[in-house]
Image (cartoon, helix red, strand yellow):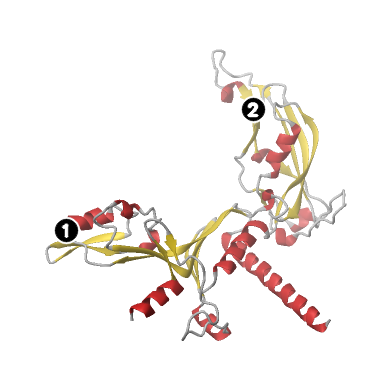
Amino acid sequence: MAAAQAVEEMRSRVVLGEFGVRNVHTTDFPGNYAGYDDAWDQDRFEKNFRVDVVHMDENSLEFDMVGIDAAIANAFRRILLAEVPTMAVEKVLVYNNTSIVQDEILAHRLGLIPILADPRLFEYRNQGDEEGTEIDTLQFRLQVRCTRNPHAAKDSSDPNELYVNHKVYTRHMTWVPLGNQADVFPEGTIRPVHDDILIAQLRPGQEIDLLMHCVKGIGKDHAKFSPVATASYRLLPDITLLEPVEGEAAEELSQCFSPGVIEVQEVQGKKVARVANPRLDTFSREIFRNEKLKKVVRLARVRDHYIFSVESTGVLPPDVLVSEAIKVLMGKCRRFLDELDAVQMD
């Protein structure tokens, strides 16, 4: 019985010890365990696999993906980071820049500004094309000149009062439609995601005058095309109390974990600790610093339960980014199958 429990733990849990981590590698491949049928079975996979949306708002999404291997989870994360396309500034035509920000640094800052435009409505620009068209390019103009405020108080030292347009923000970027873009996209729909990103600071007499070309690209080519601020996953925590913890020890135990993980209840006049919500734990392993309590708790993670956190830059809603990442992954699988068919035909 103990041997069977040890095997099951090895197959399904990553165990965190005081001085190391056990069962790190996946071992449930065919033939590794006697009595287990670990051969791939589509019906079994479809039965065990599920996706649970835990939280979603305008820019962030948290969901559980259960029943997959780490390789698939990590592939999904990497696709979100590097292979879902967006629109970003690629070329900057500088007509005049007398600010203290060099042209190259200014162009780099402009490239990192997220542009609110659905990349699915645009095509990739062909390599070598110098001039963009309405189907593959967005154009923005930035023209700001700093002047003195004639109505400022003589004894004022506040730049906000002394100068006009001394801070250049993304709100100063003006969309210049190409071709029929003005008919396709309503006014105000093509713009930077945030209008309060500071681009540069000016002083009287200084000016920035430039034209930007935005193209479609992926984060694998440059980080400015990445559609997410963060895309990460972690395994679901699994915390087990190996024996009852009562009295002052229960309070002490709750202090060793993140708030909400351990709950202290009154049972027949005694304080008793129980695991309330292990999902909230960050696994600081503070419990291992307590000599009395470290032997009454087992810390582990569920091997095939992944908690994904996706934070969009605002270019597309996070649920759309996830669906686009799934499409990219499906395309990779189709190309792989086509390659296998081609090899078999040869």
Q: Position of residue 28 (x, y in %)?
A: 51, 76
Name which of mark 1 and mark 2 comes first in the sequence.
2
In this picture, residue 267 sits left or right of residue 79: left
Residue 310 at least partly seen = no
Rendered image: mark on residue 247: 1
Using a 10 Å C-alpha cutoff, classify the residue at mark 2 as few (fewer than 14 neighbours), some (14 to 19) or many (20 or more): many
| Quarter of the C terminus within the rendering | bottom right
Residue drawn 73% across the image and 28% down it: 207
Rendered image: mark on residue 166: 2
CA gap, disc 1 and disc 2 = 63 Å
Instruction: Name the one closer to the observer, 26 or 90.
Output: 26
Identify whether 160 is placed above or below 226: above
Identify whether 187 is placed above or below 309: above
Residue type highlighted by circle 1: Gly
Residue drawn 31% across the image and 55% down it: 287
| Quarter of the N terminus within the rendering | bottom left
Residue type highlighted by circle 2: His
